[in-house]
């Protein structure tokens, strides 16, 4: 396991050089803050495991059986999160050392008690503070400041500094524009009302997201990731460059459930990346394929890594609507990656996996019961169940389903592990949601939203494309190293209103736009965590892998512009004929761009044809009958020329 020339997964091929688990851990500790946790062993480790599991159980209890006021539920949730962050995450990466096992410094204990205590004080004295309103006393002001600062420190430890810099600028703006008693007004609004730290982001996190994270942990424990990989192998393993296509399909399915591009890259990549390298794909390309596909899993309906449920709450549309409109963009995204790995395989002359080495359909079909929790979840939500209850029922079904297969049966240890995983995965999202609430709170209390709208509209001079481009840059920068869910919340509260109010864009299109660009931050240099994880397994250069992943995910940079410029792509104000035309032109456009990037159609293309095809692909992506006809004509002519040239070569 520790040797460099051995794979990190027992099912991988032994004659291909890939990274060990130690390599993956090293690169993740270098780039990913969530991977730098305190070393706990023995009885303390078991106590912490039980406490984290109890936290997950408490979240289920709070959502299923209590009717507490939101101003009790949310600060209680954040107070508990703060305690666990200080237990698990040290002040610096350098503090994660073997000699510091089972140790937590006194200042971390003080910070944990002070920060959590501030939120618990609010819980206990909830009624009094609400009655005081903006007349909060000095003690309450101090506690509010402590609570916000400690939460910020938690965010720094778990997600990084970028989001804090943004939040800090917003808070300074609030203090400068707070009128009389700016400190009291700012602290009251940001700490003691549901428009600040304990605003909608934390409300959604404590009500929905935490339950779907727990559901994802239990679903993974049933062995569904292995089932998805087997299905992908059966479908595409024998095709040209089969392992890469397996990676695209399996990562789309696994990433949809896990909601973590980095985690999914490591999980499925440990199987697919060695297979890709053995087939003949370069290491940087293999790692990039896995990273791009795993990142895209979060836009894959129906789960979308729990973001679909958050979007439904933020935009105010039914969950079923989100799922329907997300289908075509997601299909185009994965089609783009699929086409590029296919064309690369053709250009390099790569083969697939021999059929005799692949699982048979008759072997996979008996395991289709693993999909029952997923199907049930979707059915329950669309049937009128609350999302919280649907998630809890689906989690219980995961436990039932696991009993069928002895290998994945949920023993008490696995049950405890799943609860612990659910709690751990909640921490980073919860603290980021708290900081996102600060940003949203400042926008609400100061009217900053209108200032931002005026600024962007002024810079763009009313041009939607320019406004979209500026928004894209903000999303990518803010999304670097930040959980996708938190990035979406920040952009949905700051940038989406600019597009809707200032530019007149449909609210669902605007939300989906910022969501897409929040996601691609995980594969966009310089902080491309998913790509770095893939590079560690592939034993490839991290930056080269990141640039390859960005190139493979080119669809993610184009599709949001497509549905914003032409909302009919998301079934908004359209008819069947128009939608079919959009589907056809989008697919052909994606094909043209993939061919241009890979430089291969039916044979290697000359540079001029590549440039022309790229332009034709963009024309097909842009709404308009003239551009569609021109793009289709160009693709058809070049295809005919290339087929003729290949026949001539053979002759």
Image (cartoon, rainbow, N blue to C red):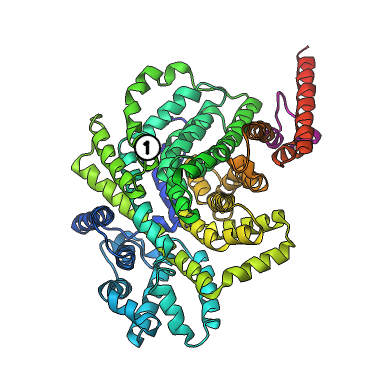
* Residue 617: image location, x then y, percent: 72, 37
* Residue 626: image location, x then y, percent: 79, 37
* Residue 594: image location, x then y, percent: 66, 35
Q: Is residue 603 above or below residue 219?
A: above
Within 10 Å of disc 1 (Cα), the crowding (few <14, some 14-19, many 20+) is few
* Residue 231: image location, x then y, percent: 42, 26
- Most foreground residue, 313 or 412: 313
Which quarter of the rendered picture does the N terminus lie within?
top left
Which quarter of the rendered picture does the C terminus lie within?
top right
Provide the residue span drawn in magenta. 592-614
Give the quarter of the image for residue 152.
bottom left
What secondary structure predominates along the stretch shown in magenta? helix
Q: In this view, does 71 lie above or below 561?
A: below
Does the magenta portion include 59?
Answer: no
Determine the residue positioned at 46% across, 44% down. Answer: 304
In the image, taking residue 160 as reference, residue 118 lies left or right, namely left
**Residue at disc 1, secondary structure:** helix
């Amino acid at each position: 396991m520790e040797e460099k020339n051995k794979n990190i997964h027992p099912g991988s091929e032994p004659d291909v050089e890939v990274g060990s688990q130690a390599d993956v851990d090293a690169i993740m500790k270098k780039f990913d803050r969530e991977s730098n946790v305190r070393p706990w062993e023995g009885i303390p480790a078991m106590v912490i495991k039980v406490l984290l599991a109890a936290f997950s159980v408490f979240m289920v209890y709070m959502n299923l059986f209590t009717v507490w006021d939101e101003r009790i539920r949310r600060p209680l949730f954040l107070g508990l999160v703060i305690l666990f962050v200080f237990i698990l995450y040290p002040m610096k990466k350098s503090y994660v050392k073997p000699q510091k096992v089972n140790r937590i410094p006194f200042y971390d204990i003080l910070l944990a008690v002070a920060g959590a205590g501030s939120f618990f004080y609010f819980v206990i004295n909830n009624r009094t503070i609400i009655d005081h309103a903006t007349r909060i006393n000095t003690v309450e002001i101090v506690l509010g400041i402590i609570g916000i600062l400690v939460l910020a420190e938690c965010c720094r430890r778990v997600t990084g500094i970028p989001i804090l810099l943004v939040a800090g600028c917003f808070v300074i703006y609030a203090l400068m524009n707070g009128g009389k008693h700016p400190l009291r007004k700012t602290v009251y609004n940001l700490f003691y009302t549901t428009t600040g730290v304990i605003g909608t982001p934390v409300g959604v996190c404590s009500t929905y997201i935490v339950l779907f994270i727990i559901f994802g942990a239990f679903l993974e424990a049933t062995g569904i990731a292995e089932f998805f990989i087997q299905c992908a192998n059966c479908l595409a393993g024998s095709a040209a460059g089969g392992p890469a296509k397996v990676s695209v399909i399996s990562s789309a399915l696994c990433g949809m459930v896990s909601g973590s591009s980095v985690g999914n890259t490591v999980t499925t990549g440990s199987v697919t990346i060695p297979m890709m390298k053995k087939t003949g794909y370069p290491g940087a390309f293999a790692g990039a394929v896995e990273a791009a596909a795993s990142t895209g899993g979060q836009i894959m309906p129906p789960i979308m890594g729990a973001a679909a449920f958050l979007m439904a709450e933020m935009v105010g549309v039914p969950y079923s609507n989100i799922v329907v409109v997300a289908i075509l963009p997601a299909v185009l995204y994965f089609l783009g990656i699929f086409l590029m790995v296919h064309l690369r395989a053709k250009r390099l002359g790569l083969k697939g996996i021999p059929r005799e080495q692949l699982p048979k359909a008759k072997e996979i079909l008996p395991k289709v019961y693993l999909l029952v929790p997923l199907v049930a979840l979707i059915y329950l939500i669309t049937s009128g169940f609350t999302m919280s209850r649907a998630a809890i029922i689906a989690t219980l079904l995961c436990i039932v389903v696991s009993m069928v297969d002895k290998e994945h049966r949920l023993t008490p240890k696995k049950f405890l592990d799943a609860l612990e995983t659910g709690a751990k995965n909640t921490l980073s999202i919860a603290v980021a949601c708290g900081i996102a609430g600060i940003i949203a709170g400042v926008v609400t209390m100061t009217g900053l939203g209108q200032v931002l709208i005026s600024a962007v509209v002024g810079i763009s001079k009313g041009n939607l494309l320019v406004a979209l481009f500026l928004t894209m840059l903000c999303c990518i920068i803010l999304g670097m190293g930040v959980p996708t869910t938190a990035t979406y919340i920040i952009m949905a509260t700051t940038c989406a209103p600019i597009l809707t109010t200032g530019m007149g864009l449909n609210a669902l299109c605007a939300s989906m736009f910022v969501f897409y660009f929040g996601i691609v931050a995980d594969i966009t240099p310089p902080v491309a965590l998913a790509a770095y994880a893939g590079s560690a397994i592939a034993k490839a250069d991290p930056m080269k892998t990141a640039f390859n992943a960005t190139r493979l995910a080119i669809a993610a940079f184009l599709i949001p512009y497509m549905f914003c410029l032409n909302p009919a792509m998301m079934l908004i104000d359209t008819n069947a004929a128009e939608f079919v035309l959009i589907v056809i032109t989008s697919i052909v456009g994606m094909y043209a761009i993939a061919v241009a990037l890979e430089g291969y159609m039916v044979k290697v293309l000359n540079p001029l044809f590549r440039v022309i095809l790229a332009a034709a692909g963009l024309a097909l992506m842009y709404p308009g009958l003239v551009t569609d006809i021109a793009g289709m004509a160009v693709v058809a002519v070049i295809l005919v020329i290339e087929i003729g040239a290949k026949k001539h070569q053979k002759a």
